[in-house]
Amino acid sequence: MMAQKQLQEYNYVTLADDSLYRYAKDHVDEWLDSLTLPCIIDEAQRIKGLPLSVKNIVDGMSAQSPLFILTGSASINRDGLDGQDPLTGRALRYTLRPMTKRELARNARNSVVDLLWDSTPNLDYHSSMNRAELATSMEVGGFPSYALRTFPLTEDQLRMAVRADLDSLLGDTILPGQHLDRTIAESILRQVLTVPGDIYNASRISTSIGYTTTTVNRYMEIFRHRFLITYLRNLHTRPSVQTFARSKIHPIDTSYSIELLKQAGKDFRDDPVIFGHLFESFVVNQIVPEIQWSNKSFDTFYWRQPGRSPKEVDLILEHDDEFIAIEVKSNTKVQRSDFAGMVAFEEGGHKLRRGYVIYTGNEVQKFGGHMYAIPISALWEDGGFMEETGTDDYRLLSKVFPANASVSKDIEKDVDLSSNIVDRAAANIFLSYHHDDNDHLNDGIIQLMKDVQEEFNFQTGKKLNLFIDRESLNWGDDWQGRLDNEVSAANIIIPAVTPRYLQSEACRKELLAFHSRIAGKPNKRIMPLIVQSIEEMQNISRGDPVWKIVHAKQYLLSGDLRLLSVDERRKKVIQLTSALIPVIEEMYAASASASENFLGLENAREKGDTLACAASISEPEKDLETALKEFNEGFELMSTVLDKHPAPRTSSMSDYSQWASQVSKELQPSLERITSSSAAISSNWEKVYEPIQIWIGLLKEYPKGETRDTQIHEISRILQGWGNSFQATEEMRLLPMQMSIMAAFLPSLQGFADALKGVVDMLANMKSMTTSLQEQIDRLSRE
């Protein structure tokens, strides 16, 4: 289906259609001749002789692009010419593995394998990922159907989805002529996947389940062809004589192993040994798949010495007899002894280019000349590595260069964004947009802002820096550093607002993070660009923080970019530029004043006094806590009513209607309680959020010392309390959906269902805003 979506110019047929499959199997050459080329054939593995028939067609034709794309949910047959692959020299083969975290974050412009090979870990990188977040990533895994959902799956829904996929992959119709005994298959699969990363021992499995080693080995081959497992051979043993023997077996996705472990009554979160095994497989699944788009070809192994106390390395990447050694540790601290395996590997005569210990801590640490400990999140987050651009030139991968920037040849390893990368400009524009919107408009959003950039230069003779994130919705730390360092120029964040932008979790998080950093700073401003009207949106509360940000600021109107003629578009560019110029002049004057004295951050209430900020928070914070307590009590009361009156099991409309009517009466007190408390939450949140933003901004300029440290600690305490209070439970997130179901029978409840969803979304946004503030405080504490 992905190939069909991505390659819409190709004809598409699928052998999952049984009637088509039966005909094509018996008349494969005739069927292929009837197809309109170029063509995608899905589930191509179901017809064993298909590759040979494709070869015969391809050999008689010439084309500049592929004539056939064969896809399947299992390995496509390679036999046909005395056991040889008939498509050798005529085809490229790719294995579509579950997505890595870099891919899920839309940050796969560089393969992580290339970074590990060519780049230097960034010693200033700090990971904010905690163990609970890591465990969730391991549990969800990389299958798009699990990981890329608008609404995340509940634990039960995820388990059902994984079980269904495992059940499908153990079916008997995936590969032609390959039938399996489901009982045997499940027994062997459980033995393998519940000990992920273990060294394969057919005899042990055979003894445990009572089947012969021949049977075990045959099923392991089936699992490999059906993309259930992957394996690493031992480099110490001659690879040419190995199959699975003494190989390390990893699940193709950790979600599979975790489901089977849960079925066995084991919780990986509470068992450090199981967690460690899964973590190793998770790391392998973040690295090995990205070999397919790396700049070099690599072979993968693990390495283990023979003997009673062997040294071992969990993952080896080899290119032209040069190696990267990777050891995986689920600890938060690294010791020198953790590098013992790769030291032994190098002393054994292997040319070691780089050695890594990947662990669950937060810091990048250097051990010796070419060995590093790196946090797991450095594999996918911007800023984890420095990238070599020449013999002595480096740049941070996390830097998002402006569209018109030129890189100086004398950039040092530690880059100062404010002076080395970008020439001084009248203003810096940070463009925040949803990639699907820009794609739908044929790059229209980016091109519009580039035209404004050029028009600004034409009208004023001054430079306008335009920062564009082309690869990911999450910019890492670049924009934060840029905003913090630039105090003598205007800094304008322009969110390209559309309904899709307002509903995107990544876009919302980005805008809220921008907003949290600009309070009280006269040279920083959010100026929305309304690309598509949002006024008719029904599924967002008008009290939503992002909605308020968009409507509280001076904004620009682009008009409908789909309908503008060339002349209308040119006029629109002039119009937008003319609206920007006075704003930038105003901000420039304010920033000049601010650069003379950091108390330019003051306003009439705080007057630049951090103690005044703390005092202004005191009363509304108490009121906020009271409102949150009231909200939670109302929610608990509502949950009690719904538990007391579960939905009827029958499908009778009258039964549902009667149930909804009865429950709605008992819910009324809790509904009123939630309604009043949510209004108080919103009101008091606004009263505490701005002062604490300004407080943090003032502390950035505060001299280091005990007073500053004490205030940082106090803010951190406040934020941690808020973060805990704003944590919506799974039950709370599902409640609006339950209310919507009831509203189908009592329409009068729909308004409250929508409002309740708005409250839950509001709490999630407040949680995001709190997290952003906490990240700023964490950076302050490290400075």
Image (spheres, rainbow, N blue to C red):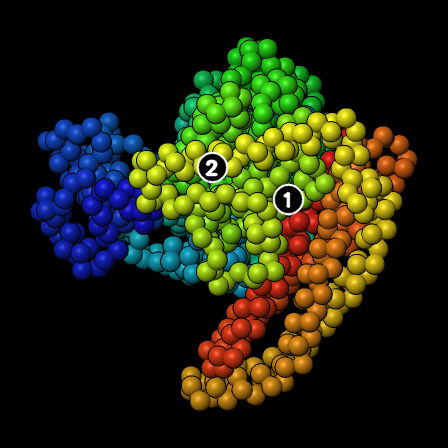
* Residue at the spot 65% in from the left edge and 59% down from the top edge: 763
Three-letter code, disc 2 = Leu
Q: Quadrant of residue 677?
A: bottom right
Label 1 sits on residue = 515
Q: Considering only vertical position in the picture, is 179 above or below 441? A: below
**Res. 290 in view:** no
Three-letter code, disc 1 = His
* Residue at the spot 76% in from the left edge and 47% down from the top edge: 692
Frontmost of labels 1 and 2 is: 2
The Cα atoms of the two marked residues, 1 and 2, are separated by 22 Å
Residue 223 bears which disc, if any? none
Closer to the camera, 332 or 606? 606
- Drawn side of residue 705 relative to residue 598, left or right: right
Q: Considering only vertical position in the picture, is 127 above or below 240? A: below
Closer to the camera, 698 or 712? 698
Q: Secondary structure at mark 2?
A: helix
The percent position of residue 535, horizontal first and vertical second, equals 48, 58
Are the residues tagged 1 and 2 within 8 Å (C-beta)? no
Q: Quadrant of residue 348?
A: top right
* Residue at the spot 19% in from the left edge and 55% down from the top edge: 21
Label 2 sits on residue = 576
The percent position of residue 230, horizontal first and vertical second, equals 45, 41
- Drawn side of residue 172 relative to residue 599, left or right: left
* Residue at the spot 54% in from the left edge and 32% down from the top edge: 581
Q: Quadrant of the C terminus?
A: top right
- Drawn side of residue 24 relative to residue 398, left or right: left
Mark 1, other Cα within 10 Å: few <14 / some 14–19 / many ≥20 = many
Residue at the farthest right position = 706
Q: Considering only vertical position in the picture, is 247 above or below 350? A: below
Q: Earlier in the sequence, mark 1 or mark 2?
A: 1
The percent position of residue 381, horizontal first and vertical second, equals 58, 36
